[in-house]
Image (cartoon, rainbow, N blue to C red):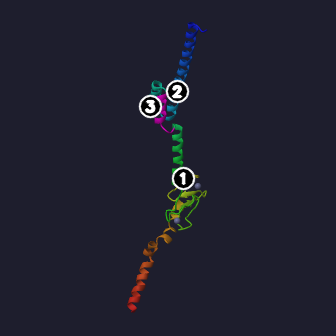
Amino acid sequence: MIDQDTLNTLLLYAVTAFGAITAALWLGMVIWTWRDIRQRSRDPLAQIAAALVVAVLGVFGLIVYIMLRPTETLAEAYERSLEEEALLQNIEEKPLCPGCGRPVKDEWQLCPYCHTKLKKPCVSCDTMLELAWNICPVCATPQVAYETAAPDPVPAPGNPSAPIDDSPAPESEAVEFVENDSY
Ligand SMILES: [Zn+2]
Ligand SMILES: [Zn+2]
């Protein structure tokens, strides 16, 4: 037969064990919440609030926390922002011809579709330079000689009004006058 003292001792052990397990679970939940919220928020107020809710409400606090916590961890949010940035850069860095809007390559001197001049080679090292640059970023050679030579042939085909204003216009007028006189 079990006497009263033994029963009390067993009961005490049971209560102690139950209390220890409960305390360990409670501590585990609070620590887990603390670590989890620190991965999801840098706001110290939010971190303390989340840990407090779980500490005070226990399992129910944990359920509420899991329902309301930020969906993304900070690492995930950072990774996503990097991906978005890379996507944006891909879109921005795809060069388009200013003349016809078709995609062109960085190493092309002119657009093969509409013959718009895109780049110029360095007079010294043949690095492809932007048209506006007057010095080579690779060999530091000033591009003045090329600058003065290059614009001359470009307007001739692209801008028909320039050569006509110089000399052929009076000639054509003269021809017209002659023709008018002859009639
Ligand atoms: Zn083009
Ligand atoms: Zn150069």
Q: Dot 3 corresponds to which residue?
A: 46
Crowd tier of the residue under label 1, counting other residues whose Cα lies within 10 Å: few below 14, some 14–19, many 20 or above: few
Q: Dot 1 corresponds to which residue?
A: 90
Tell which tag, 3 or 2, sits nearer the viewer.
2
Asked if 64 appears above or below 154 in the picture, the reply is above
Q: Amino acid at mark 1?
A: Asn
First reached walking from the N terminus: tag 3 or tag 1: 3
Q: Which is nearer the eye, 128 or 94?
A: 94
Q: Which is nearer the eye, 109 or 61?
A: 61
Q: Start and end of the magenta stretch?
A: 59-72
First reached walking from the N terminus: tag 3 or tag 2: 2
First reached walking from the N terminus: tag 1 or tag 2: 2
Asked if 32 appears above or below 112 in the picture, the reply is above
Q: Quadrant of ligand 2?
A: bottom right
Tell which tag, 3 or 1, sits nearer the viewer.
3
Percent of width and height locating residue 107:
59, 59
Crowd tier of the residue under label 3, counting other residues whose Cα lies within 10 Å: few below 14, some 14–19, many 20 or above: some
Q: Amino acid at mark 3?
A: Ala
Asked if 4 appears above or below 182 in the picture, the reply is above
Q: Are marks 3 and 2 in contact (CB under 8 Å)?
A: no
Q: CA distance from mark 3 to mark 1?
A: 37 Å
Residue 156 drawn in magenta: no
Considering the whole magenta stretch, tell me its main secondary structure: helix
Q: Secondary structure at mark 1?
A: helix
Q: CA distance from mark 1 to mark 2?
A: 44 Å
Q: Are marks 1 and 2 in contact (CB under 8 Å)?
A: no
Asked if 114 appears above or below 171 in the picture, the reply is above
Percent of width and height locating residue 153:
52, 69
- Residue 29: which disc? 2
Residue at the (41%, 89%) spot, across then down: 179
